[in-house]
Amino acid sequence: MANLYIHFPFCKQACHYCNFHFSTSTSNRTILWEAIVKEYEMRKNEILLPLESIYFGGGSPSLLSPNILANFIQKIKKNHILNDNLEITLEVNPDDVNPHYLKGLLQAGINRLSVGVQSFHQSELSLMNRAHNKDQIVSALDQISKLFPNFSLDLIYGMPSSTLELWKENIQQALTYNPPHISAYALTVESKTALDYLIKSKKIELVDDDLVKEQYDLLVNTLMKKGFINYEFSNFGLPGYYSINNQNYWTGKPYVGLGPSAHSYDGKSTRSWNKANNTKYLKAITDGILPFDEEQLSRKDRFNEYVMTGLRTYNGISLDFVKQNFGVRYGDYLEEQMNRHLKDCNLYWDGDNIKVTQKAKFLTDGIASDLFKI
Ligand SMILES: C[S@@+](CC[C@H](N)C(=O)[O-])C[C@H]1O[C@@H](n2cnc3c(N)ncnc32)[C@H](O)[C@@H]1O
Ligand code: SF4
């Protein structure tokens, strides 16, 4: 079982908070896409079968035409054994949506959309420097919710000037479109972004952590009441609508990532990542060279990753799994480290699995790092 990820590294404009790899240049888009297709040809034998998920991310892959996507999907379908319910996701920016485009995506075989809404408030969209406005979100979601049974909405909380009331309105507005899946992320200030500069130069101020926690708790409580399962810290799905791509990723299944900056994992211990530079990527692929670096994950690295991703998911971490895969010493270490958090009711046992309690959810990453092997 495996995932295929394709990174399209172009955007219309730079969002102030974003440090994903992208370029706003309008030149080279076509030849870079051709290089990605060539990379696929060079690496297709690495893709383990059956293929369960194809994910077009970015950047803004909704800048690609349905025709281009259809040709690529056809190629993949011809070359690989596919899972019966193969998930094919496209990240879509609201300003790229129109009825013709959506119909083309359906015809191309895209069966899941992840819509980058981020906020329904124009003031927040402007602060983020998003390319879309509130009207474009409304129009995009109206159309998508009628045509795609499986779609997700991305939102960001903890924005400067945000309040609990503004965030509540964002959640309510999102729910009016009956999305079967929502991803909501706490704003992270990434270094060297415009947001980082605006904060450091005191032009804007971050909200305090207590508000961010209240916003997260409100999100979890509201969505749980609506039948969503918080299957990963930032991800909420109605039953049957959890993202296959995300779940495979968190459970350590292998994936192949194509395009500049895309990561790959062999499902065992080797992780690699393509050069996050469009020009260097293009040159290497044109010369028939794969432009990647790689690392071997040690037992300790894999244990720490298992603890971090496991605690963030609704399955938690399994002591048996740890003993079998990392050895008894790791199991003993884990039991010892988690005692304090069991006593403080931050963790609890669910059968053999250790999970984070409702009250401690917001603290998940901190709890996980207390259990790390150093
Ligand atoms: C790969 S990104 C971009 C997808 C698409 N280009 C878009 O902007 O809608 C996926 C999601 O990560 C989230 N994200 C990106 N940078 C973030 C940051 N600094 N803090 C919080 N969330 C962030 C946004 O919600 C975004 O939709
Ligand atoms: S958030 Fe999305 S649209 Fe904005 S710059 Fe990042 S990748 Fe591009």
Image: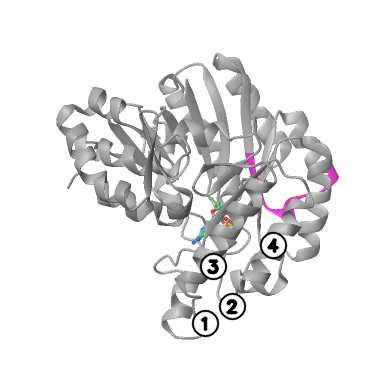
The amino acid sitting under disc 4 is Asn
Q: Which residues are magenta?
A: 90-100
> Is 342 situated left or right of 59 in this image?
left
Task: Examine the rendered structure and indicate whether residue 98 appears above or below residue 231.
Answer: below
Residue with the most extreme top position: 81
Compare marks 3 and 1 and give the one earlier in the sequence: 3
Residue drawn at 47 percent across, 30 percent down: 248
Q: On the image, which quarter does residue 347 sit in?
A: top left
Label 2, label 3: how far apart the Cα atoms are: 8 Å
Dots 2, 1 in contact, CB < 8 A = yes
Query: Dots 2 and 4: beta carbons under 8 Å?
Result: no
- Report the residue at 41% width, 81% height from top: 200
Query: Judging from the image, what secondary structure is the residue with disc 1 in?
Result: loop
The residue singled out by tag 3 in the image is 158
Q: Dot 3, how many residues are within 10 Å of its Cα: few (below 14), some (14-19), or many (20+)?
A: many
First reached walking from the N terminus: tag 4 or tag 3 = 3
User: What residue type is disc 3 on?
Assistant: Gly
- Residue ID for mark 1: 204
Name the residue tied to disc 4.
Answer: 170
294 to the left or right of 26: left
**Dot 2 amino acid type:** Ser
Q: Under tag 3, what secondary structure?
A: loop
Image mark for residue 161: 2
For ligand 1, tell me if the residue under mark 3 lies within 8 Å.
no
Q: CA distance from mark 2 to mark 4?
A: 14 Å
Q: Are marks 2 and 3 in contact (CB under 8 Å)?
A: no
* Percent of width and height locating residue 207: 51, 75
The x, y position of residue 40, in whole percent, is 49, 29
Q: Is residue 318 left or right of residue 337?
A: right
